[in-house]
Image: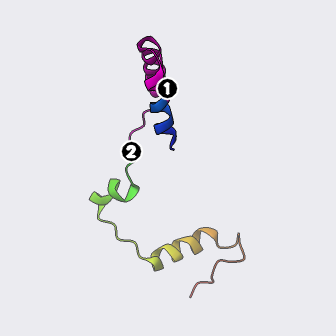
Amino acid sequence: MTVKEAVLEDLETLPAVKQQEVLDFVQFLKSKEVKRKPRRSLQGSLAHLNIKWTEEDMRQARNEMWRGYTKDTEDEK
């Protein structure tokens, strides 16, 4: 039996006044949830700029940024 089924089964055995209390509590719990807008991806936000990055571009940028700081960056080819 799922939690939902167990709650519904127990709810049906309660008097109407107690069922109303359960409903009030559920609505209280729902009101505590933070409502967040879905995040837009940067790719979608910057689409109007028509920038095309390749894997090679990313590798070069990473190497330029980290050159001299880490051992795992590739030497410039």
User: Tag 2: residue type?
Assistant: Pro
Q: Position of residue 8 (x, y in %)?
A: 44, 31
Question: How packed is label 2: few (under 14 Cα within 10 Å), some, or many (20 or more)?
Answer: few
Cα–Cα span, label 1 and label 2: 21 Å
Q: Looking at the picture, does residue 77 appear above or below residue 12?
A: below
Farthest-out residue, bottom? 77
Q: Nearer the viewer, residue 41 or 1?
A: 1
Q: Quarter of the image holding residue 68?
A: bottom right
Question: How packed is label 1: few (under 14 Cα within 10 Å), some, or many (20 or more)?
Answer: few
User: What's the residue at 52%, 76% (across, down)?
Assistant: 60
Residue 13, magenta (yes or no): yes
- Between disc 1 and disc 2, whose residue precedes? 1
- The residue at which mark 2 appears reads as 38
Q: Looking at the picture, does residue 35 appear above or below residue 60?
A: above
User: What's the residue at 53%, 76% (across, down)?
Assistant: 59
Q: Main secondary structure of the magenta part?
A: helix
Q: Position of residue 26 (x, y in %)?
A: 46, 25
Q: In the image, which disc is placed on residue 70?
A: none
User: Tag 1: residue type?
Assistant: Leu
Secondary structure at badge 1 equals: helix
User: What's the residue at 56%, 71% (across, down)?
Assistant: 62
Q: Nearer the viewer, residue 2 or 73?
A: 2
User: What's the residue at 46%, 25% (across, down)?
Assistant: 11
The residue segment tinted magenta is 10-38
Q: In the image, which disc is placed on residue 29?
A: 1
Secondary structure at badge 2 equals: loop
